[in-house]
Amino acid sequence: MITATGTLRVYVTRIADDLLINAQRLAEYMTNAPELEEELAIANISLDNLGVAQALYSYAATVADDGRSADELAFLRTEREFTNCLLVEQPHRDFADVMVRQFFLDAWHLELWAALEASTDPTIAAVAAKAVKEARYHVRHSSGWVVRLGDGTPESGARTQRAIDSLWRFTGELTTGDNHDATAAAAGFGVNPADLEGGWNARVQQVIGTARLAIPEDPFQATGGRQGRHTEHLGHLLAELQFMQRAYPGLDW
């Protein structure tokens, strides 16, 4: 039976998982960006994501009241226990992959945080009020790069289109809800992701059109991340992310 309290924990943890895994992917790319300023931008966005994730994990730990801390939720859960969307765990081949993946996620977060500012849960509303300010910067940054790359040289345009073609199949999960989302929306502390699809899709269509690129016609969308069914990439990512805590249990940072 799905309860509001149980859903609150699941709902908050899902958002935190998206942010943590994306922060790790961005951290992997540092020292590889095309210019110094971009190195700093990627590092700052990764830290922004990590900060919000930490706040949400702390709240999820309080709600669950099962003795697990925020660190344990981040560093001691298995792959099947993570509920992040499949998009954020996808690896990157080059800068175009990083910016396209980031743009899809940033556009989603801008819609999500704006809606969650009205959450009936004071903690979620407070986190959203801070996160939406960061999301406005993030989406300006990533969308600017998508346009710059797409409408740039033939090489940069081709690489950016390739990134869109490979990552688009993982975007449908962002706006696909389940019973937990429905319960969260009915209780007032969350939103049904399907209700945000229009705003997200409009922004994505506009930016990709400005970049002179195209959205793939293939209707297939991969799902499963919210239920703990991930691609082969997440296990490798978690092995690096969780190494220190698992190698030295109880390490005091």
Image (cartoon, rainbow, N blue to C red):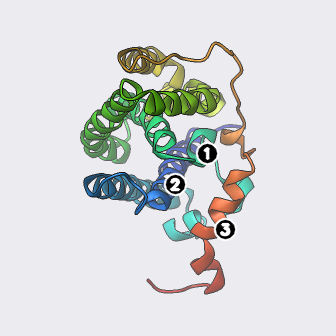
Q: Earlier in the sequence, mark 1 or mark 3?
A: 1
Q: Residues within 10 Å of mark 3 (few under 14, many from 20)?
A: some
Q: Is residue 228 left or right of residue 198?
A: right
Q: Can you give x and y, in whole percent of width and height, for residue 17 in the image? A: 54, 51
Q: Earlier in the sequence, mark 3 or mark 2?
A: 2
Residue pictured at 47% horizontal, 50% vertical = 19
Residue bearing the label numbered 2: 25
The alpha-carbon separation of the residues under discs 3 and 2 comes to 13 Å
Quadrant position of residue 124: top left
Closer to us: 58 or 229: 229
Residue bearing the label numbered 3: 239
Q: Secondary structure at mark 1?
A: loop
Closer to us: 159 or 55: 159
Residue bearing the label numbered 1: 90
Residue pictured at 45% horizontal, 60% vertical = 27
The alpha-carbon separation of the residues under discs 1 and 2 comes to 8 Å
Image quarter hosting the N terminus: top right
